[in-house]
Image (cartoon, grey):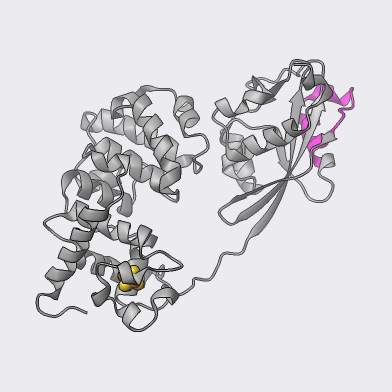
């Protein structure tokens, strides 16, 4: 692919393009390792446009590592609520606490120390350390791998371990040692804006003349398709209790419940945050939910609970296609459950809840119940 001084031209063209056309993103206006770290965690599997308002709220509320380390986890989850993949938020705070104790509140500049933090893998460490500290570490994620596969006309499944290692070597070779942070961002920017998965815009590409994939007419068909993980259908039933004042209750997360949830295919993002009583079902959704509620509320055996179905809610999490059947249960008074949180049904979204729980709350509110209407 490269002859004589082509390599220097390749780097110059890509960096020149990036410096001229890069998107003005809030985390690109700083070299603060904390903010760069935060942006990199938020950007994992999440679109830039979705991240921006969350990032801005976060740095406003937690301007530095110390501020993030010392608040209750619930406060962090509340600000993260809606962004998804909540283990990122939990790990972020655990890492902040570790940084305060072990690194005097400063994100570590050494690779092994960065990798020892919760939620930091090779890609994230390379991104943060190159951008914030100028370390010569090349990033490789799906986005950059696609660009490299097209530039080098690499066939086959890129995620196969040996091929991924080869791509890492190529990424290391391409890295501009003078500007590793900008170089990494340039590769990511190329993948995000021009060398996109479906329709690469090769005519606008700053390194078009070096691209083997384009020369061979393979740009759009690379990388080759991976075998898709089979979608798992999951059906759940949820109970939304509502009292005469429109109040409902949510259950807390618990270690025991999480183990059971994983076994039952209840997505952890339901069970690891405040959530409605919810159970996996097959066939009639009301019967297993009723059994579960009888365990949860032994006194309910005496009073047969009236279930009002609220249609179906659909949600997907990675390979799971989830269908939830919500049932509203109107009562004069909410039952007392240790550890449960009482909250107005209409204000669920102010709590750290998953998008699934929000959808269930919306379904419950869609047809206001006679009792809740009075509010
Ligand atoms: Fe991607 Fe096309 Fe540029 Fe090759 S020429 S790197 S396929 S945008």
Q: Residue furthest bottom?
A: 216
Percent position (x, y) of residue 307? 85, 32
Magenta stretch secondary structure, dominant: helix
Check residue 150 for magenta coloring: no
Residue ID at (79%, 35%): 327
Residue ID at (44%, 23%): 72
Query: Left or right of 176: which side holds 253?
Result: right
Residue 347 sits above or below residue 82 on the image: above
Query: Left or right of 220: which side holds 365?
Result: right
Check residue 298 for magenta coloring: yes
Percent position (x, y) of residue 103? 22, 33
Percent position (x, y) of residue 66? 30, 25
Q: Nearer the viewer, residue 346 or 352?
A: 346
Query: Left or right of 59: which side holds 49?
Result: right
Residue 74 sits above or below residue 29 on the image: above
Q: Quadrant of residue 318?
A: bottom right
Asked whether residue 184 appears in the rendered view, the answer is no
Residue 59 sits above or below residue 158 on the image: above
Q: In this picture, which residue range is highlighted in magenta?
A: 288-307
């Amino acid at each position: 692919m490269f002859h004589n001084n082509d390599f220097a031209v390749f780097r110059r063209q890509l960096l020149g393009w990036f410096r001229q056309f890069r998107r003005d993103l809030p985390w690109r206006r700083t070299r603060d390792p904390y903010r760069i770290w935060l942006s990199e965690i938020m950007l994992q599997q999440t679109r830039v446009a979705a991240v921006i308002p969350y990032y801005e709220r976060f740095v406003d509320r937690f301007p530095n590592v110390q501020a993030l380390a010392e608040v209750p986890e619930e406060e962090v989850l509340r600000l993260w609520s809606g962004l998804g993949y909540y283990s990122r938020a939990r790990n972020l705070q655990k890492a902040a606490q570790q940084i305060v104790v072990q690194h005097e509140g400063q994100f570590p500049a050494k690779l092994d120390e960065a990798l020892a933090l919760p939620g930091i893998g090779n890609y994230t460490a390379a991104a943060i350390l190159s951008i914030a500290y100028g370390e010569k570490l090349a990033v490789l994620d799906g986005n950059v791998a696609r660009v490299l596969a097209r530039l080098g006309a690499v066939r086959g499944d890129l995620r196969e371990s040996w091929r991924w290692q080869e791509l890492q070597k190529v990424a290391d070779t391409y890295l501009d040692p003078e500007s590793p942070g900008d170089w990494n961002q340039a590769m990511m920017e190329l993948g995000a804006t021009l060398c996109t998965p479906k329709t690469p815009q090769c005519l606008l590409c700053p390194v078009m003349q070096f691209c083997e994939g384009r020369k061979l007419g393979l740009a759009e068909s690379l990388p080759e398709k991976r075998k898709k993980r089979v979608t798992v259908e999951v059906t759940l039933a949820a109970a939304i209790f509502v009292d005469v004042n429109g109040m409902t209750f949510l259950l807390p997360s618990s270690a025991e419940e999480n183990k059971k949830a994983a076994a039952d295919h209840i997505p952890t993002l339901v069970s690891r945050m405040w959530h409605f009583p919810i159970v996996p079902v097959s066939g009639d959704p009301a019967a297993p939910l009723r059994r579960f509620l009888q365990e949860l509320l032994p006194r309910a055996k005496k009073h047969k609970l009236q279930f009002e179905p609220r249609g179906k809610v659909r949600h997907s999490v990675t390979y799971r296609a989830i269908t939830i059947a919500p049932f509203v249960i109107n009562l004069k008074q909410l039952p007392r459950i240790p550890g449960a949180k009482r909250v107005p049904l209409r204000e669920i979204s102010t709590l750290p809840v998953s998008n699934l729980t929000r959808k269930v709350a919306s379904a419950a509110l869609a047809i206001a119940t006679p009792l809740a209407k009075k509010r």
